[in-house]
Amino acid sequence: MKLNFLSYEIFLIVLLLMIRSNLCGQAANEGVRSISSALSGREFDKALELLRPALQNAPNNPQLWMLQGLAFSGKDDTKSALASYRHALKSSPDYLPALEGAAQIEYEAGNEDAVSLLEQVLKLRPADVTSHAMLAVMAEKKGDCATAVKHFSLSGRMLDSQPEALQGYGVCLLKLKQTEEAIQIFQQLEAARPDDPRCRRGLAAVQLSAGKLDEALATIKPLLDANPDVSTMQLAAAIYEADKDTPNAVKILRDAIVKDPMQAALYVDFAELAMDHQSFQTGVEMINAGLKLQPAAAPLYVARGVLYVQLAEYEKAETDFQQAEKLDPSQGMSAAAEGMLAEEENQNNPDQALATVRDKLARKPGDAFLWYLQAAILSKKSAEPGSAEFERGLNSAQRAVTLQPSLTAARNVLAKYYLDAGKSDLAAKECRMVLEQAPSDQSALYHLVIALRKTNNHAEIPDLLKRLARARQEATRQEGERNRYKLVVAPGG
Amino acid sequence: MTISRRSFVLLSLCASGQHLLGQQPGIASRDIVAQAKPAPSGRPFDAHFTDVAKEAGLHAPVIYGGVESKKYILEANGCGCAFIDYDNDGWMDIFLLSGTRLESDPAEATNRLYKNNRDGTFTDVTKQAGLKAAGWANGVCIGDYNNDGFDDIFCTYFGQNRLYRNNGNSTFTDVTKEVGLWETGPARWGAGCAFVDYNRDGHLDLFVSNYIRFSFEHAPVPGEKSTCNWKGIPVNCGPRGLPAGRHSLYRNNGHGTFTDVTKQAGIDVATESYGMTVVAADFDEDGWPDIFVACDSTPSLLFMNNHDGTFREEGVTRGVALSDDGMEQAGMGVGIGDYNLDGHLDLFKTHFIGDTSGFYRNDGKANFDEVTRAAKIGVETRFTSWGAGMVDLDNDGYPDVLFVTGSVYPEVEKKMPQYPYKTPRVLFRNLGNGTFEELESQGGEGITAVHSSRGCAFGDFDNDGDVDVLIVNMNEPPSLLRNDLKGTQNWLKIKLEGVKSNRSAIGARVIAHYGNKVQAQALVSQSSYYSCNDPRLHFGLGTVNEADIEVHWPSGLHERYQQIHANQLITIREGKGLVANKGWKR
């Protein structure tokens, strides 16, 4: 997401007005006036020419450095512009125009340095909506939704013209489980762009996530009634399924497949639906139909492999995972799936499972899931803390979360390692990170309770126990849901 | 942390398929992978178990529900048993609970009291003792509630629980109504029970766990709901999907009656648990008894005693309520003992097929760490497991673990032979280094024999200085596993008599120091599965021939006894010291 909150022209006008007003109070400076005039007329080379002697005469004048930054910016020479702004800030660290200029360049480049500059701007001008908006977008990109939401909420109307930022705001609210606020943001987005089906789908998806299934269906209905595309149909299937209307979910997914039989994701969706209802063979048959049309679709082989594991047909699963790897070595799933398969197949032989995972890791050392698997398998061996095996497991879990910070399963394993090692503070930290992403994760909630108990930090425990109880009830309910409906293939397919 | 087939699905498809918004929450099912079995230690095991029930005269089957299939969960959970010296002759008698059948009460359907003939045989004295009773009995706990010197019997039922007062003349009287334990509302499903002097007034109070709120009118039948299928086969429903029972605490008023103090004691906070076996002991060593309740498919409960007549429930926080990854388990039976010889009472809990049993190490302050895998107990997940004990079976000074198993779905075996109804007993020998080794044929045919077992009680019925096992088998006669222990390992048995404390000394904590070892045991009125062990605490001493004994009496009195010689029973009377044994002859 590349957003431009302040165009160069606006930025220039604002700055020049500030400079002029500033200069008016001083003795007239014809040189600076000429430079400003050149900048206003977009005569950047002329401005730079005028700036050269002026800077020689006053090398510590932050205004002149800032004007040079403006001139370079006008020439799209951001590197020189940034250097000029930085020079200005050296002489005068709180010089607002230079801070803003530098922040703008760093922000556009996606550099983390923008954050400190913007925070400095906010110290000087706390209500600056542009800086809040820029900080919000940067935080959202980093996945720091708490910070993002804080700044988004202070961005005022700045977001109205920034649909991508608005969407980021909504997604962050959703991640923080502030679903009502998220729905409002997506409603705002949808109202701003009523003809964009993506905005409508976004709103429906958020409503689905909030469990407002009737509202989600109502939101998506206009799209469904008007020759829907397959993305709409996919979402509708998810809403129907959440609404316990599995027959309609199946029907619309089948219709989507008929409409676009070349879209592999639809078959994978169907396989997932089949899996949720313990209808593994039905899922296999649908994937087979997809593979007839797309024999080179790696995701279909992965999905079928997973279904074969459920049916304990390990050889077939392995063949599928290998085929997926061959077809698309970059898709990264089949190595992980093969590792899982090794684990599943070698329940009583963790060393064999480990050997397989290590073999995969040798080929894909950057695969976070494989590192997680290695950590999890080693964890099952219950090595003594401090032993080489324990340390290897701990390191594997650490590696997994470094490579993929959002892999909550790996964080849970890491938390358990820390607990076993007596590092309860570190365990608590990992649990909290899991809970930021998955607030109902039972393992994280439980391990956090235990970690807090071990550190004699009891204040938070009662609330965590309530959350854990709710998570358990919800998990039990969902388990019942999964067994509610079984998919079968009608005679003749 | 384990990887299940289910997590395979989620982790794989989350990455490959379309997920609109974030991750799905966790899953409560425990499709767990067994831990790899370590290489055999090669060490001999001196205990050898032979089922002598038939020769001993224990012929009558324990009737419990349908034989070929079970329509309701009521028929499936079975019942417990007890070792009780009801006539104070120094020999353990046997009390066996019984269920019945849905259609009618068969003639054999009754609880049974067997008198020990002191020659390896027993005589059924049920009728003359006044204990003949049919119904859906579940749990039993033994204790001298009226401090008259004779142990009384409390039985839980679906329907009306019953308290039998021992009249001291080899007969019992059902005093349920007169003591105030009669229920007037809808039928409850009493499950586990424990006599416990929670307010330390010297009188045994009574805790009763309840399983589910069940009625034949409203109970779903096999296949009716999603909770009524197992491996795709319609089976009896529950406990999930059925309303949970409420647990009760009754205060002994000291003059032969009880008062329901559930609410004022804070027990009523536990509203969503399927309670099963109850074990009451002083887990945090503060001198006051706490109460642990194993719960099926819900978090187990640990009620900590506040010393003021109330409890606070802290099972999750203290690490005994859930699996080590925070998932609920099907808690059935409970063993209590000190497996690592650190002087603190640890817990062992049995679970459903596809899960390991749970082993919980106590730090002495009732903070527990789950050590199932570290102790190598996680190697076994094949059986639905019930009664359990943490007892020294080979007298080597290290408590071993034995539990009994059996499916709850007799109908499944016909379609899926890999899930038999009758399964063997499971024996783990303590290797003395914090780990256990699973033994099969080394334990004898009493261990490898298959039955669908439920409750079991541990005790020395033949007074030969080792621990034997009484086992309830569904719709079969019980098993009486005689321990034919070889070798010359030493032992010590301790019988306690309360004076200021309750007469049975229930709640006492005894610590034995032998060689360089220290072992804690608790005198409890229920453990295993709905069952009650021999009240004489048995310590294997290995090669050591004397021990120092500490007794923490329920009254708060702390006594020490030095250099007690091995291979004898001693009787300690509170505040008086060693007294003559009653009727003990070897």
Image (tube, coloured by chain):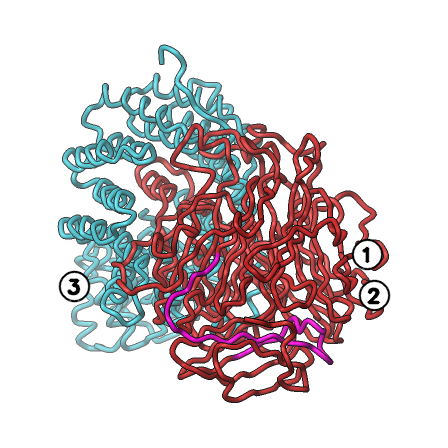
Chain colours: A cyan, B red
Labelled pair 2, 1 in contact (Cβ < 8 Å): yes
Instruction: Give SS at disc 2.
Output: loop
Q: Quadrant of the C terminus of chain A?
A: top left
User: What is the CA distance from the residue labelled 2 to the residue labelled 1?
Assistant: 9 Å
Chain name for mark 1: B
Instruction: Give SS at disc 3.
Output: helix
Chain name for mark 2: B
- Label 3 Cα crowd, 10 Å radius (few <14 / some 14-19 / many 20+): few
- Indicate the amino acid at tag 1: Val
Q: Disc 2 designates what residue?
A: B256
Q: Disc 3 designates what residue?
A: A49
Instruction: Give SS at disc 1.
Output: loop
- Label 2 Cα crowd, 10 Å radius (few <14 / some 14-19 / many 20+): some
Does residue B397 lie above or below B81 as drawn?
Answer: below
Q: Disc 1 designates what residue?
A: B175
Magenta range is B482-511
Q: Depth-wise, is mark 3 or mark 2 nearer the camera?
A: 2
